[in-house]
Amino acid sequence: MNAEKIAVVLFNLGGPDGPDDVQGFLKNLFSDKAIIRSPLPVRFLLARLISRTRARSARANYALMGGGSPLLPETRKQAAALDAELTKRGRTVKSFIAMRYWKPYAADVVRDVRAWGADRVVLLPLYPQFSSTTTGSSLKSWQEAHGPEGVAVCCYPDGDKFIAAHARKLIETWKAAGSPANVRCLLSAHGLPEVVVKTGDPYQWQVELTAAKLKPLLPPEWDVQICYQSRVGPLKWIGPPTDACIEKAARDGKAILLSPVAFVSEHIETLVELDIEYRHLAEQHGAKCYLRAPALGVDAGFVETLADLVEDALADTGAVKIRSGCGGRICPADRKDCPNHRAPANKAA
């Protein structure tokens, strides 16, 4: 056993613990400059307005899951599984969870990591595809909380084990339903306002990379499409929208098989939006079959992916402070929000 104490900080969005937390969670979310890019006075007013107007409907959706978000319990399971895998590999490790918009916040975790006495720190977002609105914002919150320096992983959209885990979940879901014919496989990712992508955010490009790596592992007769869910507000969002794709698939007589390809945990966007709202939409439009592959959760291949990322970060003894799953830059040069945009491109990407 390696006596060096390794702290792994797992970052995710967070979610309200109960009904009384919903408005505060929404206010935190929409106060983030990475989410609403208006000047501070306008952003503050918008955050108050949106959190108040959306709180009632959001509480109703969280009530469908018991009143609060399951994201923190799900992430705790992932942390325990990752610790077990790294311990098996001979590491002395403890995973800490830092949520962006609800407890435990980065500042709380900074204190816990320091109290534990970590020798080295690996910052590991549970967002496979990088966006300034998710990974970028989470890593910034760690810096603002004066967290100890370490190696940060910015993204891992095309890791072999990660991709294989998604393919396995899709095929298992399809076979469990009797292997229906005429499948349209929708790879649904959280959307972003189009302006965010146009100004250099690499998220959409990385989602497309995930899909391109995933498609060859799926049955060749499947019609595979990318789509984007969870759009809010008046801005134009990247598309095509998941709901419109579901409607069209139903009209086309397809068996709909959907994967939350950018989510690694079950939460409101999967358990309510995909499983309830979009299932109802599919049935309304006459879909003959609507299947949803589960999020990766504690799938062994995904846990091994996380463990490999930690090992690779620890093996990086250079001056690198942030690295992709491949080590260097994987994004095109015009994706200037990529944290590695000045690094040499990875030739294997």
Image: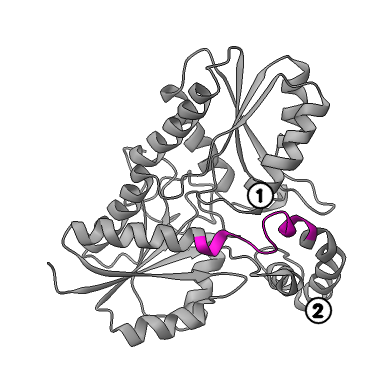
Bounds of the magenta segment: 60-73
- At horizontal 78% and vertical 18% (from top left) the residue drawn is 251
Q: Position of residue 171 (x, y in %)?
A: 47, 26
- At horizontal 49% and vertical 71% (from top left) the residue drawn is 98
Q: Position of residue 275 (x, y in %)?
A: 67, 40
Which residue position holds label 1?
269
Q: Is residue 259 visible?
A: yes
Q: Is residue 326 visible?
A: no
Query: Secondary structure beneath disc 1?
Result: helix
* Mark 1 surroundings within 10 Å by alpha-carbon count, few (fewer than 14), some (14 through 19), many (20 or more): some
Measured along the vertical axis of the image, is residue 11 above or below residue 218?
Answer: below
From the viewer's perspective, is 116 left or right of 282?
left
Q: Residue 307 sits in which quadrant?
A: bottom left
Is 165 in front, or is 349? 165
Is 86 in front, or is 4? 86
Q: Residue 242 sits in which quadrant?
A: top right
Q: Position of residue 244 (x, y in %)?
A: 77, 31
> Which of pointers 1 and 2 indicates the residue nearer the eye?
1
Q: Quadrant of the N terminus?
A: bottom left
- At horizontal 51% and vertical 43% (from top left) the residue drawn is 206
Amino acid type of the residue tagged 2 in the rendering: Pro
Residue 293 within the magenta-colored segment of the rendering: no
The colouring scheme, among rainbow, by chain, secondary structure or one colour, is one colour
Residue 41 marker: 2
From the viewer's perspective, is 107 left or right of 122?
right
**Number of numbered markers:** 2
Mark 1–mark 2 distance (CA, rounded to whole Å): 29 Å
Closer to the chain start, of discs 1 and 2, is 2
